[in-house]
Image: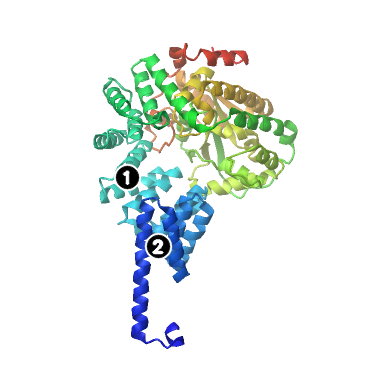
Amino acid sequence: MVMAQFNIPRELYDRLSQDMNERLQQISAMARQSAQRNDWATVHRCADEILKHDAESAEGFFLMGLVEKAAQHPLKAVEAFEKVLELDAERYDAAIELSSQYVTSLRYEEATRLIARYKSYLNNSPRYLDMAATNYTSMSLSAEAWPLYKKANELQPNIGLFQANLAACAVFLGKIEEAREIYESLLKQNPNHQRNHYQYSRLETATDSGHIDQMKRVLDASKQQPSQNIFMYYALGKELEDLLRWDEAFDYYKSAGDAVTSVSNYNIETDTGLIEKIIDTCTRQWMSTDPNSKPTEVTGKSPVFILGLPRTGTTLTERILSSHSKVSSIGETQFVEVVLRRESGVESIEKMNLDMIEAVAKKDIWLVANGYLNMVDYMLEDTPMFIDKLPYNFLYIGFIAKAFPDARIICLRRNPMDTCFSMYKQAFTWAYKFSYSLSDLGTYYIAYSRLFDHWKAMLGERLIEINYESLVTDQEQQTRGLLNKVGLDFEEACINFDENTAASMTASSVQVREKVHSRSVERWREFETQLAPLRTQLDAAGIRVD
């Protein structure tokens, strides 16, 4: 003991210890105040100071975890927060921060276990209730998020972020009226909040110009750059289109797309080059070698992959199928791409690149299958089939088909012009970077069309092709045909999919609560003049738009 080693009187030792503890508490308080100001340099210095005096300080490692989180170093943040829990298992703040980093790293099963373990600790912490709920939402677990968001708002009812998160979750769960009330309250509190205007505009079809006029006043008074007005542009475009004011609507859609493009630093050749690499790599010869003959570790569940370009009816098809008693949905996961990247062994911050495709194509495909099934296992319900619906999995159809010989693969197809325009007017925050420029959209669609033809030639009837226009104009017949191809008997619930209460976290989360309609069929013709260059581009590539 220090006291015995230096012959320090106990009274003096206790006083020195108390002084040091008070000093460390002051440093901790300073760090937390600095964190609120995003002054991470000061937080870092405080963490270092605490750990210098106490190398096993849970608080010191917690502050260091916050620093690494702010610096977007998830691996280092995970290490720090895990150390906190090793030192003090009661630190629920570290547990929820750690779960957030697990989500960032797509370690969803570990994140869900951690939140479940610490949920009961959060009853008096609105901040960490909200964070835990947001982690659930990020993992497509809106139903689990809802009570946590509700509790956070009960504890602190006037926090705009908490209210907005609750409203967004309400939309995912089909609680549209509740979401409307929250957004109306938020906009009364802060009429200038553009993201809330955008979310509010999506809740229903506009019938008058009241909200449009309000948004225009906000926009006119704004001194922000166009890139900071993107959500307002999309909201105005949407409501003006609702009122059939086509030209005005397009002008706002174009303003939004141009604003995104101006700050995105995007090159279309990155995406088209990836498609060409996939076509060159995933050949018939590749498909026929090393078939997945090894048993997978998760058995008894048959995957159904629903994919295609966004806004082509993937969510509608998912809702129809998941309304069947033998089918459940795990929503939109990125697990196919995650496992392909991981098994490639290529280290890169890019989501997917040419080297990864080349490398993973040479790996044992059963590793991909087992890796995927192990990742989704925690999400599976007690049904024979489960749906993974992520539009851009169309890139990986060959890998999916090879890894899962018995999987159903459903690709949605829609009129090219309607497809492109529906993407153009959607804020994807900011996925599908090719969708914010009509020229890039045309270029990408041409490449996508080549890829689809490639998969169709390789897989034939195994690739189930669903036409959006046929589905919305002849719902029952098309639904019966789809169920037959998937190997399911007809159930009336598949026709009444709008009664399905399951969460939907896609751009169509509001529309899926409605009956099937054909309002969007041939909608592009209302904008034919503005879309003429896109049509010319597709025509020149031999893609029929009529």
In the picture, residue 96 is in which quadrant? bottom left
Q: How far from the left and from the top, in percent, is residue 272? A: 62, 28
**The disc label shown at residue 470, or none:** none
Q: Is residue 347 above or below residue 240?
A: below
Dot 1, crowdedness within 10 Å: few (<14), some or many (≥20)? Answer: many
Q: Is residue 166 above or below residue 392?
A: below
Q: Residue at x 36, y 72 (%)?
A: 21
Q: How far from the left and from the top, in percent, is residue 420? A: 51, 22
Q: For mark 1, give the secondary structure.
A: helix
Dot 2, crowdedness within 10 Å: few (<14), some or many (≥20)? Answer: some
Q: What's under tag 2, amino acid-wise? A: Arg
Residue indicated by mark 2:
91
Give 294 or 394, whichever is nearer the viewer.
Answer: 394
Q: Which quarter of the figure is the C terminus placed in?
A: top right
Let me know if residue 519 appears in the view.
no
Q: For mark 2, give the secondary structure.
A: loop
Q: Which residue is drawn at 36% across and 26% down?
A: 235
Give 148 or 223, whichever is nearer the viewer.
Answer: 223
Give 345 or 193, whichever is nearer the viewer.
Answer: 193
- In space, the residues marked 1 and 2 are separated at their CA atoms by 22 Å
Q: Which quarter of the figure is the N terminus placed in?
A: bottom left
In the picture, residue 188 is in which quadrant? top left
Q: What's under tag 1, amino acid-wise? A: Phe
Q: In this view, does 234 lie above or below 159?
A: above
Left or right, residue 122 beside residue 425? left
Let me know if residue 264 appears in the view.
yes
Compare marks 1 and 2 and give the one earlier in the sequence.
Answer: 2
Q: How far from the left and from the top, in percent, is residue 303? A: 56, 39
**The disc label shown at residue 162, or none:** 1
Q: How far from the left and from the top, in percent, is residue 344? A: 66, 45
